[in-house]
Amino acid sequence: MELNGKVAIITGAARGVAKGVAAAFVKAGANVVIVDRDQELGQKAEAQLGEHGNVAFVAMDLCRHEELPAIIDLAIGRFGKLDVLVNAAQASRQLRLDETSVEDARIAFDTGFWPTFILMKAAYPYLVKTRGSVINFGSGVGFTGAPTQASYAAAKEAIRAISKVATNEWGPDGVRVNVICPFANSEGVQAWAEYDPQGYARQIDNVALRRIGDCETDIGAAAVFLASDAASYITGQTLMVDGGQTKTN
């Protein structure tokens, strides 16, 4: 599962799960463009990950939709091609459905669905040239309907929907599209564990393996596999990398 010489764009990669994915990609030999709106964290991640390989940081607010294709141009300008697009960035507000406003829902779609949609379209011509792949990030809450996750679940399921359409439309060109639904020890989950230790413990009890995933060695490793030639016959799939928390048929 090596990625030697492959070029990848990973959104939201200054922190959390996406940073773990970026670390796994770099250590597998990929040239990585990390995208995040936080300049300070992004530059710090670039320096840290750059110790293991070629990393370039692009400061970008993913809500500035008209500017997003420039990310693809910057990656091509820096590394000459594009093999993998990883759409991992997402923000949302946790509210009951009856308390969720249109603006609340818009935050989830503006930071997750629309950037995924726009970047997939902009990346497609380059992915055709390399017979590359897209890895989008979904969530188990789209399957379970977890309380207070209305806008988040809706955005994530919309991402899964266009991933399946792209699978059928882009498959003849050799472009693969898959989705990962993770459960990992990101900064957000760590903050939740401190705020609500009992709720966190209950969540861990729902995980068959009785542990939370590591952002790099669990989630990142799964992403490396999907991006590698070892997964060349895998497309249109949703991979639950959550320790058995969500069971699918």
Image (cartoon, helix red, strand yellow):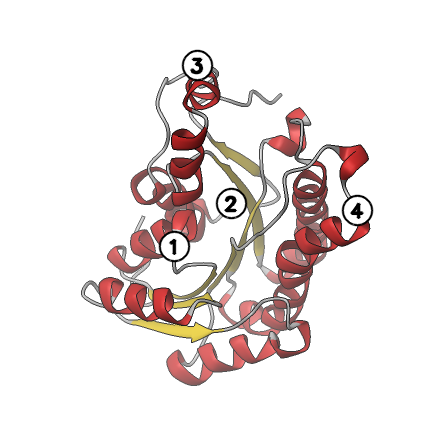
Mark 3 or 4, nearer chain start:
4
CA gap, disc 1 and disc 2: 30 Å
Q: In the figure, 59 relative to 204: above or below?
A: below
Return the x and y of residue 224 as percentages of the image width and height. Answer: 37, 49
Along the line of sight, the residue nearer the viewer: 135 or 174 = 135
Question: Residue, x 72% and y 56% (percent of image)?
Answer: 169
**Pointer 1 residue:** 15
Residue at horizontal 44 percent and vertical 67 percent from the top: 38
Amino acid type at circle 2 is Tyr
Location of mark 2 (residue): 233
Residue 118 in picture, x, y percent from top left: 67, 67
| Disc nearer the start of the sequence (2/3) | 3
Q: Name the residue under label 3.
A: 205
Q: Mark 4 points at which residue?
A: 101
Q: Tell me the crowding category of disc 1: few under 14, some 14 to 19, or many 20 or more residues within 10 angstroms, Cα based.
A: many
Left or right: 82 as drawn, with respect to 212: right
Gap in angstroms between the C-alphas marked 4 and 2: 41 Å
Residue furthest toward the front? 195
The answer to whether the residue labelled 3 contacts the one labelled 4, judged by CB atoms less than 8 Å apart, is: no
Q: Nearer the viewer, mark 2 or mark 3?
A: 3
- Name the kind of residue labelled 1 in the image: Arg
Q: What element carries label 4?
A: loop
Above or below, 95 against 16 in this view is above
Pointer 1 or 4: first along the chain: 1
203 up-or-down from 217: above or below: above
Q: Which of marks 1 and 2 is nearer the N terminus?
A: 1
On the rendered image, what quadrant is the C terminus found in? top right
**Mark 4 burial class by Cα count in 10 Å: few <14, some 14-19, many 20+:** few
